[in-house]
Amino acid sequence: MAPILQVALDFLDLPRALAVADEALKGGVDWIEAGTPLIKSEGLEAVRQMKRRWPDAVIVADLKTMDAGRFEMESAAKAGASIAGVLGAASDATISECIEVARNYGLRIIVDMIEVPDVAERARQVEQMGADYVGIHTAIDQQMLGGASLDLIHKVKDAVEIPVAVAGGINSETAAEAAAAGADIIIVGGAIIKAVNAEGAARQIRQAIDTQVGVETALYKRATADDVRSVLEVVSTANISDAMHRCGELTGLNKVFDDIRMVGPAVTVRTYPGDWAKPVEVIDRAQPGDVLVIDAGGIGPAVWGELATHSARERGLAGVVISGAVRDTPEIRELRFPVFASQFTPTAGEPKGFGEINVPVSISRTKIFPGDWVVGDNDGVVVIPKSRAAEVANRAMDVLERENRLRKEIQDGSTLSQVAYLQKWEKT
């Protein structure tokens, strides 16, 4: 028997969740999950409306119960849920209470093993308590760091006889792997709910599950610690700013030309205003794809010009950011080498040789360390700390994918204020 495909509706707004669920069901989804964000935002009214809309469907309430098991499971059952979730990290008393209530109300219980250290052992324990399902789950925040759940499927399947669900970053490529590994329930969130065409995305995943052959995902690839660049080359500085909660921008910089694009790890330089020795020397030390970040005090004379640009371009560098002055902008524009600077001037400085290379520098009150990622485009420049590069890249990609979905809703006749539910969320 083919695994069950469950869609996790991790939205904040019920109308959008219902619309996407309609599409996903047409694409071959078996079970509908009222995701935790949706239940926290809309309450169990989300489950009630789903049950009224699809009376014969299996509705999963992803409560993530940690305490008060009796009250939460009873309310979920009365709202129309077929299955409800309790955390494996909850106490035995809470899980047992959830299972007891479920028996009285015809509810089934899935125990979610998110952040449980020994998943297989805890799975054995909750099976003995009477749980109906056990769920292997990589948290969304953990997914942004590159975490995955598929390697645990075999271990848990060997430990229990009850059906095993798997969730966390699954798409049409990895769904086939999950099915081949023996998952009984495959839970998919973002790969369906962020797709411009949720029906088509669901159909691809259904095909991958049924054939156990991966289908190339319509979503963008996710960043790993070893490959951040490929994602940062797709997202915009606006996406990154949103992902970083409006942090990371280097203000007071001007681009030399339009349609500019720059991505790379920082090689830093601190120098005196007008002293262009270290900015030129660092070109020889930087690697192809690097971005030079030069702190020259934010004022002139120029520490960079056409010849430095030509040298950096030939070296294969990705661009330069200068808190200071640049000259020869017409020639730089013709070279199409990304340059951002505080000001432009015809006056050159002199190579005195003061300064340091690959030390922390500050631009517009933001400290940049060697190896931090720097992204520039027509909107400006943002810096991502090296330690958070993969996470921020993936969160920025999440922003882009959600915007693509909203853009489709606007094209279909809605408006921005409507798709953003401004009246609902604006402060009173």
Image: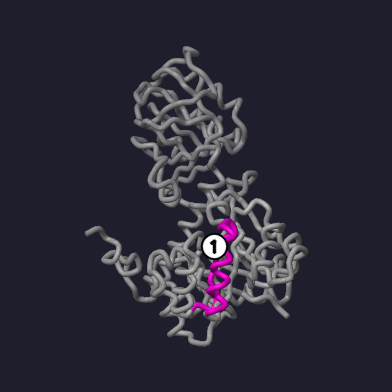
Q: Is residue 94 magenta?
A: yes
Residue occupying the point 61% across, 36% down: 288
Please, is residue 116 above or below residue 37 in the view? Answer: above
**CA neighbours of label 1 inside 10 A, class few (<14), some (14 to 19), many (20+):** many
Front residue of 283/382: it is 382
Please, is residue 396 above or below residue 355 in the view? Answer: below
Q: Is residue 298 visible?
A: yes
Residue 407, horizontal then vertical, whole percent: 41, 67
The kind of residue on which mark 1 rests is Thr
Residue 83, horizontal then vertical, whole percent: 55, 75
Residue reaching furthest bottom?
A: 56
Residue 77, horizontal then vertical, whole percent: 48, 77
| Mark 1 lies on residue | 94
Point out the stretch of residues depicted in magenta.
81-104
Query: Which quarter of the rendered picture does the N terminus lie within?
Result: bottom right
Front residue of 236/107: it is 107
Q: Classify residue 148 as left or right of residue 415.
A: right
Please, is residue 243 above or below residue 256 in the view? Answer: below
Front residue of 158/254: it is 158
Q: Classify residue 271 as left or right of residue 93.
A: left
Residue reaching furthest left?
A: 428
Q: Classify residue 2 as left or right of residue 79.
A: right
Q: Is residue 122 magenta?
A: no
